[in-house]
Image: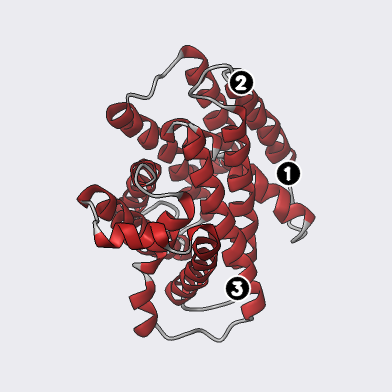
Amino acid sequence: MPTVLSVPAIFAAVFCVITWGFNSIAIKIGLQRLDVSTFNFLRFLIVIPFIFFVPRPQLPWGRVALAAFFWNILNFAFLGCALKAGIPPGTLMFIFQANVFFSVFFGKTIFKEAITKRQVVSMIIGFLGVGLLCMDVKTEAMPIIGIIFVLLSAACSSFGVSLAKSITVEDKFSLNIWLNFITFMGFAVATLFDDGFKGAQSFLLSPDMSTVLCLLFTGVLSTTIANFVWVSVLKTNDLSKVVPFMTLIPVVALLTSTAVFDEAITSRKCLAFAIILGSVIYGQIRPRALIKSALHR
């Protein structure tokens, strides 16, 4: 693999960062009109036409369904509940960085992957940052139940990604499309039991442009295209060179949320954000390896 990212790879990574940074903003706007299950049902309904053009891969469907259940269904359900509970989108994306630590934990305990002392230290530091955010629970904008929802979302996402990673398949785009199809079926059942599709029917009869754009953005651009682009970059580059870009996602989300929703940025939040980001960077980047790589160019 190349020692440095190519210009196209950098542009692709930046595209994913910006897209996913805007994602929580789009969901927040969409949830102003729709409830969580209906929004996600319509979001994945938009992706359904892809299954008529993308062949179904020959896979262990029990594991695929389990990955979709945790990675998409529970993840997006808890994420929506956190936004509904009042967690600002920018703050949400910083707390969601805990998924890096959950990934390390599940990799070690379930998939028997090696874990380093640096990763353990980074997890402890990261959760100290989340604890600092929890000190704001007395304010209306930071309800403790919302923080719990974000952490549950991060845990489910990490476990689902770990399951998906264990599935051997050449065509990652095909796997992504069919994971989305299973997710659509899951949210269809949830919406049926929630309100019998009344919310979806009401929206389809009188749609508004902002919610339609949010559904298109989250369903097509974020969930389908950006995921595929990201996996393509990972296939041709070392994980250690690509993952640090992920730390920019909450920064994009916070700046956008501040502009759109006037999200407050306090000194305590800034300190907590710095601790969380620093812990992720500390756990992912090894200075000696970077220096060694630079000397061998």
Q: Which residue is mark 1?
A: 116
Which dot, 3 or 1, sits closer to the camera? Answer: 3
- Residue type indicated by callout 2: Leu
Which residue is found at the position 63% from the left and 31% from the top?
126
Q: CA distance from mark 2 to mark 3?
A: 36 Å
Q: Which residue is mark 3?
A: 64
Image-based side of 79 in relation to 25, left or right: right
Work out whether residue 43 can be spotted: no
Depth check, front residue: 34 or 86: 34
- Residue type indicated by callout 3: Val
Name the spot of residue 76 as percent of width and height, x first: 51, 52
Are discs 2 and 3 less than 8 Å apart at CB? Answer: no
Mark 2 vs mark 1: which is more N-terminal? 1
Q: Which residue is mark 2?
A: 132
Mark 3 vs mark 1: which is more N-terminal? 3
Depth check, front residue: 180 or 243: 180
